[in-house]
Amino acid sequence: MTSPQELKTTISSGLLSFPLTDFDSQLRFAPKPYAERLEWLMPYGATALFAAGGTGEFFSLEPQEFSEVVRTAVETCRGRMPIIAGAGGGTTLAIRYAQEAERLGAQGILLLPHYLTEATQEGLVAHVEAVCKSVKFGVIVYNRGGCRLTPASLLILADRCPNLIGFKDGIGDIESFVSIQRQLGDRFAYLGGLPTAEVFAGAYQAMGCPVYSSAVFNFIPRTAIEFYNAHHAGDSATTNRLIDEFFLPYIALRNLGQGYGVSIVKAGATLVGHSAGPVRPPLSDLKPDELVQLGQLIAKLGPQ
């Protein structure tokens, strides 16, 4: 089993990504195409993959499907690519997901926000602590939605939970992030987690967060790696060109529909010949004219 500190080292550099979850025409999980997707993506050089994460529609999976997704990912990538599983929901359910991921051989979990209700900082600390103490492997907490941890709360968790090794920010509050990074220092690995993270990569790097997760890696992996390498090397000419030519028009298209952050990625995978099937309700697929626009953007990038 990968130790929490080994996982921390792994996710502290390189590009991370969240594979789509494959569904068939009846919206059932399709393990064979999912395994083939992982085989396609692995050679491009991401540092780790998050199975059943946000882009993988964790929120629409029931527990048995979650187990099948994580099992398929672990068995397909064993010895070649670290697999970090999603986990979320209320505390008891999040613990169940975390323990199942550990049993199946994942290297850690990304603890996604709890469901629906607001919570006090004391409640959030108790929630994250309970999940961390239910497993031995590494935990990355996702600061997003209803889970907005303060520096003071993270200091408590850092002291109580040695296996809490990562902080992923999906809020974009500069003051909060800088406070967290300055107070916690190298206690955590820091990950940028805003949608279409490439656009925010430069700003996050300036704040002490050099790593981000890429959703577009699911359908333009060559370009995603090209962007990351340019970002890492300080090649602003390349990153600015890709932001202008692809990412800003892509974001404008993504913003046409609620929940399109996942839908547009699945559409992109279909357009490049690696369909993961439709999204599950309550998400909805892109409209035909939106697909055409996305196809035109992808075509400008060349073969992937």
Image (cartoon, rainbow, N blue to C red):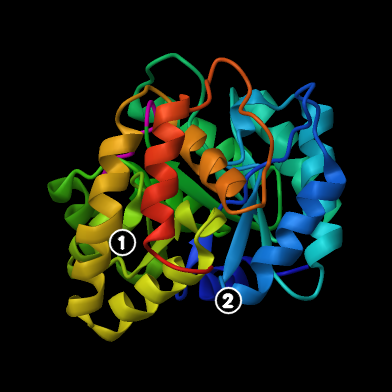
Mark 1 or mark 2: whose residue is earlier in sequence: 2
Judge whether 303 appears above or below 229 on screen.
above
Task: Write down the residue under mark 1.
Answer: 184
Residue located at (45% from left, 76% from top): 13
Residue located at (19% from left, 68% from top): 240
Judge whether 193 appears above or below 254 on screen.
below
Alpha-carbon neighbours of circle 2 within 10 Å: few (<14), some, or many (≥20)?
Answer: some
Whether the residues at callouts 1 and 2 have beta carbons within 8 Å, the answer is no
Secondary structure of the residue carrying tag 2 is loop
Q: Which mark is residue 215?
A: none
Q: Residue 81 magenta-drawn?
A: no
User: Measured from the top left, where is residue 302 in percent x and y?
Assistant: 45, 68
Residue flagged by tag 2: what amino acid is it? Answer: Gly
- Circle nearer the viewer, 1 or 2: 2
User: Measured from the top left, where is residue 203 in percent x and y?
Assistant: 18, 61
Q: Which mark is residue 45?
A: 2
Identify the magenta region: 145-152
The residue nearer to you, when weighing 106 against 51, is 51
* Quadrant of res 136: bottom right
Q: What secondary structure is the magenta-colored segment mainly?
A: loop
How many numbered circles are shown?
2
User: Measured from the top left, where is residue 8 in percent x and y?
Assistant: 53, 69
**Residue with the most extreme left position:** 175
In this orientation, does residue 71 appear? Answer: no
Secondary structure of the residue carrying tag 1 is helix
The residue nearer to you, when weighing 132 against 114, is 114
Image quarter where the N terminus lies is: bottom right
In this orientation, does residue 43 appear? Answer: yes
Residue located at (43% from left, 14% from top): 117
Q: Residue 148 magenta-drawn?
A: yes
